[in-house]
Image: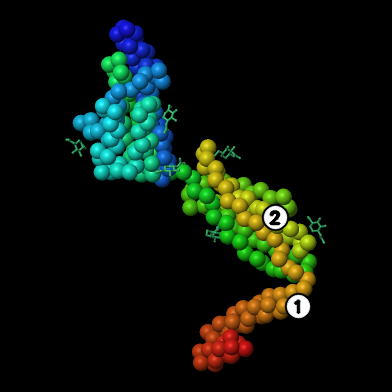
């Protein structure tokens, strides 16, 4: 029996099984599997960290304890049958080597090491929509897709024709939706190495014939307003400030 365990240990060492690497993502949970033989009935589980083997989660005499270290308080779940340790809400400080020492009811003992590596998951890109124009023929929409992360590329997907302009850190989509068309989904996917992340926006041309008159007035009116303010800003710098300001106020109150 002893020889078998030694042999198993030796095999695990040579096959690198006693020393595993697990990847976790900041803010998420990770399960460090104990590596225990599923046939074993565990009587002692000791998860430790640091070279001085500080306990963080233990099972002893049927007693589960996971509050040994403040930093891990409320963030550990120890499965007493498998010996697996789950760490919740990962932070970058959790990246280190974890040791687990297992003893079964037949006093057999085995120990493993788990290296926890932490990564930051690729964030979803951000979509910013701009209605460029709206008329009874249809609407012109612009979508700007950008990422807080440095990404390799962006890819658009939509079930309607569109044009795109790429500019390293962001990509802009232009599309025309006619007013009889229902909602259309636009998906922007960012890629970084083997990861990808997507964001979706749903656009439509909310141009109702009944509101033709009002909307035309509204868009026309606001465009006129912008144009006036622009003109006045030019005149303001060119001519005396007082006249420009008075004109601007007139235009704004009108
Ligand atoms: C992560 O753990 C928390 C408990 O701390 C739980 O509420 C949540 O559902 C877990 N998330 C996943 C993806 O399992
Ligand atoms: C074990 O090591 C850690 C980090 O090196 C230290 O913070 C802790 O105080 C040590 N514990 C004991 C009991 O020496
Ligand atoms: C504990 O581990 C066993 C064996 O892997 C599994 O069947 C069980 O669902 C786990 N329990 C919990 C609470 O996750
Ligand atoms: C798109 O968004 C990015 C990031 O917010 C911004 O820097 C860029 O100027 C925007 N481009 C256009 C054309 O709106
Ligand atoms: C990307 O946009 C910036 C300003 O937003 C501009 O200076 C630069 O020339 C653009 N690059 C490309 C490749 O279009
Ligand atoms: C509006 O778009 C829909 C879907 O692309 C198309 O079937 C329809 O013919 C278009 N209508 C007009 C007036 O262009
Ligand atoms: C994006 O990543 C998921 C896994 O998160 C993968 O299943 C999918 O195939 C990837 N998509 C592309 C287009 O590579």
> In which quadrant will I find the C terminus?
bottom right
Where does the image place residue 91, in percent across and percent down from the top left? 36, 44
Nearest the eye: 59 or 233:
59
Which numbered dot is residue 7? none
Nearest the eye: 126 or 203:
203
Nearest the eye: 231 or 69:
69
Q: How many marks?
A: 2
- Give the left or right position of residue 5, taking residue 54 as reference: right
Q: Quadrant of residue 100?
A: top left
Where does the image place residue 166, in percent across and percent down from the top left? 60, 53
Q: Secondary structure at mark 2?
A: strand
Q: Which residue is mark 1?
A: 213
Q: Is residue 7 above or below residue 248?
A: above
Which of pointers 1 and 2 lies earlier in the amino acid sequence?
A: 2
Q: Is residue 149 above or below residue 209?
A: above
Could you give the CA–CA distance between mark 1 and mark 2, rounded to whole angstroms?
A: 25 Å
Residue at coordinates 30% horizontally, 33% vertically from top-left?
64
Q: Secondary structure at mark 1?
A: helix
Residue at coordinates 62% horizontally, 58% vertically from top-left?
143
- Give the left or right position of residue 245, taking residue 40 as reference: right
Q: Is residue 66 above or below residue 160?
A: above
Residue at coordinates 52% horizontally, 52% vertically from top-left?
147
- Give the left or right position of residue 90, taking residue 121 as reference: left
10 Å crowding of disc 2: few (<14), some (14-19), many (20+): some
Q: Which residue is mark 2?
A: 184
Residue at coordinates 28% horizontally, 35% vertically from top-left?
65
The answer to whether residue 93 shows anywhere in this view is: no
User: Disc 1 vs disc 2: Cβ atoms closer than 8 Å?
Assistant: no
The answer to whether residue 225 shows anywhere in this view is: yes
Quadrant of the rendered image holding ligand 4: bottom right
């Amino acid at each position: 029996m002893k020889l078998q365990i030694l042999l198993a240990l030796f095999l695990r060492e040579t096959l690198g099984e006693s020393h595993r690497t697990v990847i976790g993502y900041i803010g998420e949970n990770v399960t460090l599997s104990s590596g225990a033989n599923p046939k074993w009935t565990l009587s002692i589980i000791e998860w430790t960290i640091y070279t001085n083997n500080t306990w963080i989660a233990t099972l002893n005499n049927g007693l589960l304890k996971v509050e040994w270290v403040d930093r891990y308080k409320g963030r550990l779940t120890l499965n007493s049958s498998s010996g697996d340790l789950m760490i919740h809400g990962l932070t970058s400080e959790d990246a280190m080597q974890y040791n687990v020492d297992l003893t079964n009811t037949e006093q057999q003992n085995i120990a493993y090491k788990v290296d926890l590596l932490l990564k930051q998951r690729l964030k979803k890109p951000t979509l910013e929509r701009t209605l460029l124009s709206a008329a009874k023929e249809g609407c012109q929409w612009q979508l700007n897709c950008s990422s807080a992360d440095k990404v390799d590329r962006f890819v658009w997907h939509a079930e309607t024709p569109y044009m795109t302009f790429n500019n390293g850190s962001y990509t802009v989509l232009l599309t025309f939706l006619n007013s009889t068309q229902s909602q259309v989904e636009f998906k922007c996917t960012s890629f970084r190495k083997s990861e990808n992340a997507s964001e979706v926006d749903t656009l439509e041309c909310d141009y109702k014939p009944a509101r033709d008159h009002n909307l035309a007035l509204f868009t026309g009116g606001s465009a006129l307003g912008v144009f006036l303010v622009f003109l006045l800003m030019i005149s303001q710098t060119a001519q005396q400030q007082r006249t420009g300001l008075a004109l601007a106020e007139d235009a704004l109150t009108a």
